[in-house]
Each structure stands twice: as structure tokens, then as C-alpha cells.
Image (cartoon, grey):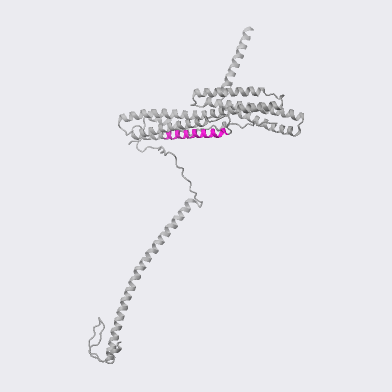
Amino acid sequence: MKKIFIFLVVGIFLVSALATKTSAQDFDYNRAYQDYTYNYDLYKKAHSEYDLKRAQYLQSRTLISQEEAQKATAKMLQARDQATITYLTAIRLKLAETKGVDAIQRETYYSLIDADVAWYKTHRDSISSAASLEDLVKDSDAAAERYKSTEITIYKSLLLVSNGKTDNFQTLISDLTGKIETKVSQIRANGDKDTSDIERWILEVKNRVSRSQDKETEGWALINKLKLTDKTKITTYNAAEGKFSESLQYLKEANSFLKQIITEIKTQD
Amino acid sequence: MNPENTNQPTTQPIVPEGVNQPVVPQDAVVQDISKLKGFIQKLKQRIKEKRQASESVPVVNKNKLLMISLAVFVVLCILLVAASMYKSLSNGKKVVSVPTPIPEVVINATPTSIVVPSRYATDSAVLELEKSINEVDGQLSGTQIKESQLTPPTFDFAITF
């Protein structure tokens, strides 16, 4: 009897541990993104309800309408916090899954995101429907103030994702260029093919990669100018993303040159 | 006719140039007739010369005119044929000239076939590199630098009562 009991306890523990592990593994960017879109929809519904109840309260000024407005406002504020939390979580997982993101920078932004998530969780849990309308307005103002810095974290994190993509391609192209250089050295040593054009094109590839890096720097210079008080942070962010698009374009050119080099190597003089 | 000589006998009648007439002493009327004949003869010769000259010039002009007409006709034919070809090519639709984008950097497209392969065309290292480059090319083509899914949400922070 005792053995059966121990067996059952161990079995339950193992099954629950396995289930937890599987659940954690399944929670990837796609799940996080679905979670975010679901919560954002909830927020929009809650906001519509808040708009309605607020209008009714401002019109009638009755105690019942006030109570309903308080409930709707509290629900909307909680939904807003929850949508922010899930959105930040989706960004965190995008950072985790994007190849090429610098490990140190990733950790830095994990910390910023985690701090924000913790703040919004605390804020969400502190909102009570029993509070007065004035308290709820103060709660909302606190979140509005916090969101100014959260926005900067969001834009910088998104730019880091883009940076990871371009860095990944820069690494791949640089590796391939190195291998081609080695092969071209062998060909030149064999003396059975003119490699002068190929060597010139290799320099062009390196030049394109270098320009790609310059564009990344320009992008970061733009985003680093963001201030808490900026009203149109998204305009700066879009401009910075534009620099990363240019960076990617240079990498596409570099890779096209590599293709051309291979064709030249395979073709007789 | 010469009125001054009408009443005076002339031993040598005036004979027009180029006319060989026997010089016979005659009276004034005969002289006048012979003069007239000479004059007419001379006139005829001049007319003949002028006629010949006038006939020779239009021949040249006519040839030129014919050549010009022929050239115009040929040009018109060519234009007609070109117009019909243009119409058939465009299938009756209005041809809109599409501006060709000028790339910032000219990259020659990699030819798919190599006309004369070098000894490295079958080199395993080169083929491996080519495969890797093509893989990177595919990844580059499918990459969107901006995460459009993660466009920041819009929240209402202006909560007032």
C-alpha cells in the first residue's frame, strides 16, 4: 500500500513537471502574438464600454451611472495594462527568436522589458473597481507617464530585432567572402585563371557590407535621439527603420556580387 | 524691211547669215522678198533652237519630279507598314511607357548557364559556396526588415471625468 502511494506521488510529480516543461516550450512568439492580439481586442471592447458608460454618467450624474462608469473605467485600465504586458512579451519573444541579435544587447532589453512588465502587472493589480473616479484617473495618468518610457523601450527593441536581421546577413556574407578569398588564393597560385576581376569584386562585396554597417549606425543615431516628451516617436522610429532597410539593400547587392564571382570562377577566361 | 532702200537699186542684196543664196542682181521687190525669206529662215532657226532648249529642260525636271514622287511614295508605304505593325503589337491598346527604374548600383545578373566552363566549374568547394550563396539569397529575398505585426498598439491615456 505504501509503495503504491509513493509510486502515485512520484508519477503525479513527473507528469506535472513534464506538462509544465512542454507548456513553457510551446510558448513561442506565435503564441505570444496571439495572446497579445486577443488582449488588445479585449481592451478595445473595454474601451468602447468605458466610452458609453462615461457618456451616460456625464449626462445623468446619478450614483448608479457613476458606479457603472467606475467599473467600466477600471476594467478598461486593467485591459490596457494587460494588452501592454502581452505586447511587451511578444516583443521579448521576437528578440529571443531573431537570429543575429547581439547577446549583450538582448539581455539589456530583456531587463528593460521585464521591468516594464512588472510595473504594469503591479499597476493592473492595484486598480480596483471600488476606487473613486478620481483615483482611477490618477491610475490612468500614472500609466500614461510610464508609457512614455515604455514606448522608447518598444521602439528600441523593435530596432534591435531589425539590427539582428542585418547583423545575421552581414555575418553570413562575410563568412562566404572569406571562403571565396581562400579559394581565389588557390586559383591564383595555380596560375590557370586570371583572378584580377574577382579580387576587385571581393573588395566591392566588402564595401557593401561596410556601407550596410554604416546604415545601422545611422539608424541607432536616430532612435537614440528619442526623448520622453516627444509626441511623434513613431516618426523617428520609422526613419530609423528606413536606415535598416537601406542596410539590407546593401547586403542584397553584396550577395549578388558573390553570385557573380562564383559565375566568374566557373567560367573559363 | 529697210524703208531707206526701197527706191534705190542695190547691186548686192542683203542675205541673211547662214543662208547660201546665189547673188543675183534684182530689183527692190526681189531684194525685199529675198530679205524676207532670209529673215524667216533665221526666225525659223531661232525658234527651232529655242524649242530644242525648252524641250530639254523639262525632261530633266520631269525626271526629278518622278524621283521625288517615288521617294515620297516609298516613305509613305514604310510609314503605313510601321503603323500597322505598331497597332498589331499593341493590340489596339494605348501603349503606356513604363519608366525603367535605374538601380543605385548596377549588378549584373548571374547567368544561369556558363558558356565555356573552367576547371573550377565542377570543384566541390566552389559548388558548396554557390549553394550557400543561393541560400542566403533566398533568405534575403524573404526578409522584411520591419516587424509589421508588432506595430505598437494605440491606447487611450486621456481618461477624464
Q: Is residue A45 left or right of residue A243?
A: right
Q: Position of residue B98 (x, y in %)?
A: 48, 46
Q: How many marks?
A: 0
Name of the residue lying farthest toward the top: A2
Query: Which is the main secondary structure of the residues drawn in magenta?
Result: helix
Which quarter shows the C terminus of chain B?
Answer: top right
Q: Is residue A6 above or below residue A262?
A: above
Task: Say whether residue A138 is magenta.
Answer: no
- The image quarter containing residue A155 is top right
User: Which of the two residues, B33 or A63, is positioned nearer the viewer here?
Assistant: A63
Q: Position of residue B39 (x, y in %)?
A: 29, 83
Q: Residue at x 70, y 27 (%)?
A: A134
Question: What is the span of residues highlighted in magenta in the rendered image?
Answer: A232-256
Which quarter shows the N terminus of chain B?
Answer: bottom left
User: Which of the two residues, A12 or B158, is positioned nearer the viewer here?
Assistant: B158
User: Which of the two residues, A20 or A114, is positioned nearer the viewer here?
Assistant: A114
Q: Is residue A227 above or below residue B51?
A: above
Tell me, yes or no, if residue A35 can be seen here: no
Q: Position of residue A35 (x, y in %)?
A: 61, 27
Q: Is residue A264 above or below residue A114?
A: below
Q: Residue at x 63, y 27 (%)?
A: A143
Tell me, yes or no, if residue A264 can be seen here: yes
Q: Is residue A243 above or below residue A20?
A: below
Q: Position of residue B3 (x, y in %)?
A: 30, 89
User: Which of the two residues, A88 or A178, is positioned nearer the viewer here?
Assistant: A88
